[in-house]
């Protein structure tokens, strides 16, 4: 069977504090953007060409989720608030036994909530990696 180049995200999942099963976020979308800072080390000896050294690597994670009316996501156990540190976060590609992005620490930089009549109440936040992280393997 050949691969058609697409896979459904219907089984993607997010787990925060993966040592517990209570920290489930009912997410509908997540994304990871990686970047490496540039250090311009152009000098007189470069023959008129720019040169770079790559510096610090960091990932930015964006999450869109539905508001859970029975569990306030701003309270324990999730504690989704600006400036909060999320520990042991996994972004699964296909259920909780498959490949995942793994972040020992994520720091929430912003959070917003949207309320739309036909779309419900949604929670959206952005977080940045703090320290190492692992790509899906």
Image: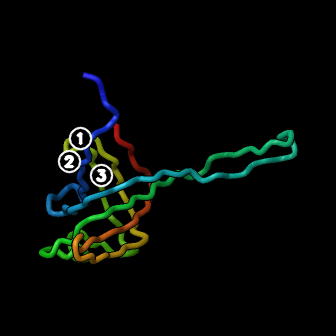
Residue beneath disc 2: 11
Give the CA distance from mark 1 to mark 2: 10 Å
For label 1, the crowd category at 10 Å Cα-Cα, with few meaning under 14, some 14 to 19 and many 20 or more, is few
Instruction: Say whether residue 6 is left or right of residue 26.
Output: right
Q: Position of residue 69 (x, y in %)?
A: 15, 75
Give the CA distance from mark 3 to mark 2: 11 Å
Q: Position of residue 86 (x, y in %)?
A: 32, 64
Q: Position of residue 38 (x, y in %)?
A: 64, 52
Location of residue 77 by image quarter: bottom left
**Mark 2, secondary structure of its residue:** loop
**Mark 3, secondary structure of its residue:** strand
Q: Are marks 1 and 2 in contact (CB under 8 Å)?
A: yes
Q: State whether residue 87 is above or below residue 79.
A: above
89 vs 73, nearest the viewer: 73
Q: State whether residue 122 is above or below residue 14.
A: below
Residue at 53%, 52% (x, y): give it.
35
For label 3, the crowd category at 10 Å Cα-Cα, with few meaning under 14, some 14 to 19 and many 20 or more, is many
Residue at 36%, 68% (x, y): give it.
125
Residue beneath disc 3: 91
Instruction: Say whether residue 128 is left or right of residue 75.
Output: right
Instruction: Say whether residue 7 is left or right of residue 71.
Output: right
84 vs 61, nearest the viewer: 61
Q: Furthest-left residue in view?
A: 70
Tell me which label, 3 or 2, sits earlier in the chain: 2
Q: Position of residue 122 (x, y in %)?
A: 27, 71
Quadrant of the image containing the C terminus: top left
- Label 1 vs label 2, nearer the camera: 2
Q: Which mark is residue 98?
A: 1
């Amino acid at each position: 069977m050949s691969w058609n180049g697409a896979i459904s995200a219907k089984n993607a999942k997010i787990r925060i504090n993966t040592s517990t099963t209570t920290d489930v976020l009912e997410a509908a979308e997540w994304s990871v953007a990686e970047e490496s800072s540039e250090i311009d080390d152009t000098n007189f000896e470069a023959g008129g060409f720019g040169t770079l050294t790559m510096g610090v690597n960091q990932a930015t994670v964006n999450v869109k989720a539905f508001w859970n009316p029975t569990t306030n996501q701003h309270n324990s156990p999730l504690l989704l608030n600006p400036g909060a540190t999320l520990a042991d976060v996994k972004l699964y590609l296909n259920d909780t036994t498959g490949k995942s992005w793994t972040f020992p620490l994520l720091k929430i930089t912003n959070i917003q909530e949207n309320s739309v009549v036909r779309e419900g109440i949604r929670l959206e936040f952005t977080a940045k990696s703090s320290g190492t992280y692992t790509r899906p393997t």
